[in-house]
Amino acid sequence: MKLKDVNPKYEKLNDDYQKLKNTLNEDENRIITLKNELKEKVEENKDALFEEYDFTELSTLKPSHEIEPEIKVITDELSKLMENMDDAFNKEKPDDLSGITKKTVEIKDLLKKNEEEIIIKKETNQIINIVDKLRNLEILIKELESRLNIFLIEINLKCSFQLIISDDNKNFSIQITYLHLTKKEQVNFESLTTPEKVFFIVSLYISVQLILDFKNITFSNLFVPSKYNKRGSIYRTIKKILPIFESKENLKTFNLIFILSNLEMKESIE
């Protein structure tokens, strides 16, 4: 084959190559431009995106020291499951699912055989009633938390109640965490100072009485545990709480009665 015969084909291929190269370069530049435009759009509408997706509920996530043990339990269970699946899972041929399919059929047959034993016998109305009671309890806890924080903010403190249900779903407890508003620090009850503990105890008692709509609220220092029953803390708490009832319109209809026993009063409370 002579050079004059090859040259036209080469020129045609080279021309096609250059066109393809130019097209690719244009596409790459277009992609870069689109990325930059998208980045600008995201920056411009960042606030709107955050408003559309409510991230406030992230505060209800469990802390890491609670999540890590749960992850370990799940990991252990998965390990046991994989041990039992050794004869079903072909490590050499992971795309071979015949063993897993066989295991699935065995489990399905086992469930069908024991269907009567695993069916939940609870009546639908009974389950609905339980759910409603739990929901009402959560509402009540939130109301108590809201009432309590009206008082706690006076000492730059805020509390949060969380309903904890046991692993067997038979028992529940209320976990309380505290936030120092000035320090932005989350603490537990034992980390509070004695005056803060006394203020919380008195405020909690009064908040419960408010929810029960007791117009005459009687409080005695005898309700406070003896190790926290300190004259100074009790008096300072009363002096901080009384102005709240005077300033809040929805609290003016309630009467506070404090009965102090075995505490020397060096000055009157006004």
Image (cartoon, rainbow, N blue to C red):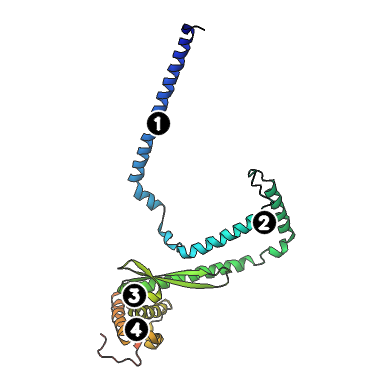
Q: Tell me: residue 110, above or below residue 14.
A: below
Mark 4, residues whose alpha carbon is within 10 Å: few (<14), some, or many (≥20)?
some
Label whose residue precedes the other's in the sequence (1 or 3): 1
| Rendering coords of residue 227 (x, y %) | 38, 86
Disc number for residue 28 = 1
Of residue 117 and residue 138, the one placed in the foreground of this image is 117
Label whose residue precedes the other's in the sequence (4 or 2): 2
Single out the mark in the foreground, 1 or 4: 1
| Tag 2 residue | 84
Label whose residue precedes the other's in the sequence (3 or 2): 2
Q: Is residue 186 visible?
A: yes
| Rendering coords of residue 22 (x, y %) | 40, 24
**Which quadrant of the figure has residue 254?**
bottom left
Label whose residue precedes the other's in the sequence (2 or 1): 1
**Real-space Cα distance between discs 4 and 2?**
66 Å
Residue type beneath disc 2: Asn
Mark 3, residues whose alpha carbon is within 10 Å: few (<14), some, or many (≥20)?
many
Residue type beneath disc 3: Phe
**Real-space Cα distance between discs 4 and 3?**
14 Å
| Rendering coords of residue 212 (x, y %) | 43, 78
Residue at horizontal 45 percent and vertical 18 percent from the top: 16
Residue at horizontal 44 percent and vertical 23 percent from the top: 20
| Tag 4 residue | 256
| Tag 3 residue | 151
Q: Is residue 62 visible?
A: no
